[in-house]
Amino acid sequence: MNYDEMKFKDVKKIIHKEIYNRGKGIDCPCCGRKVKTNMRTITKVMADCLIKLYERNGREWVHLEKWLKSQDDIDFSARGDIAKLCYWKLVEKQIKGNKFDTSVRCGIYRITDIGIKFISGDLEVRKYFWIYNKKIVDIDCYEMININHCIKN
């Protein structure tokens, strides 16, 4: 049986199996696009940025790109990583309009109650997630980490 004869759900299962087995990804049999998963954890830069976000803005909504540009003491690499804290529900993105909205409202985030508990040391979160197409597809392990672990690494 070839891919043309399979149902979409069967192709999806094969793709996921191949992604996990190979680790480097595969070419999608349907569209030819390179597909792979990425393992994500909270880095020191992400943790530092989360702490500063809360210290300087509390629970206020912030346009992350503009805010990061205005902060001299935050590592530039945080630019692409701080939004990934949404996977742990430590920050949340403001949703307005349709998903194709390109106005200034896009890119606006704030720390969550979970994020506040995490940076205060009252909460641990999963150490790793596997991400595919901006969605969590697997939990690599059930090891938990706290803010101190993130700051040390």
Image (cartoon, rainbow, N blue to C red):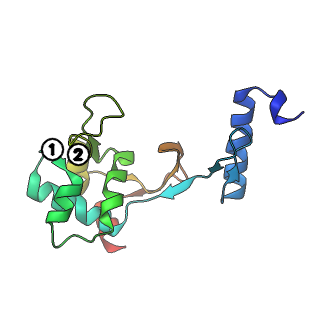
Which residue is rendered at x = 70% and y = 52% of the image?
A: 26
- Judge by depth and name the residue closer to the eye, 3 or 149: 3
In this picture, residue 118 sits left or right of residue 145: left
> Picture coordinates of residue 108 (x, y %)?
22, 44
| Vertical arrangement, residue 95 with respect to residue 132, above or below | above
Q: Would you identify the image quadrant in which residue 113 lies? A: top left
Secondary element at image label 1: loop
**How would you rate the neighbour count of disc 1 (Cα within 10 Å): few for under 14, some for 14-19, many for 20 or more?**
some
Secondary element at image label 2: strand
Quadrant of image for the C terminus:
bottom left
Q: Are marks 2 and 1 in contact (CB under 8 Å)?
A: yes
- Judge by depth and name the residue closer to the eye, 72 or 102: 102
- Judge by depth and name the residue closer to the eye, 104 or 142: 104
Quadrant of image for the N terminus:
top right
Of label 2 and label 1, which has the lower sequence position?
1
> Picture coordinates of residue 80 (x, y %)?
35, 59
Residue hosting label 2: 109
The label number, if any, that marks residue 29 in the structure image = none
| Vertical arrangement, residue 110 with respect to residue 72, above or below | above
Which residue is rendered at x = 71% and y = 57% of the image?
A: 22
> Picture coordinates of residue 130 (x, y %)?
53, 51
**How would you rate the neighbour count of disc 2 (Cα within 10 Å): few for under 14, some for 14-19, many for 20 or more?**
many
Which residue is rendered at x = 18% and y = 56% of the image?
A: 66
Residue 79 in view: yes
| CA–CA distance in space, label 2 to label 1 | 5 Å
The label number, if any, that marks residue 61 in the structure image = 1
- How many numbered circles are shown? 2
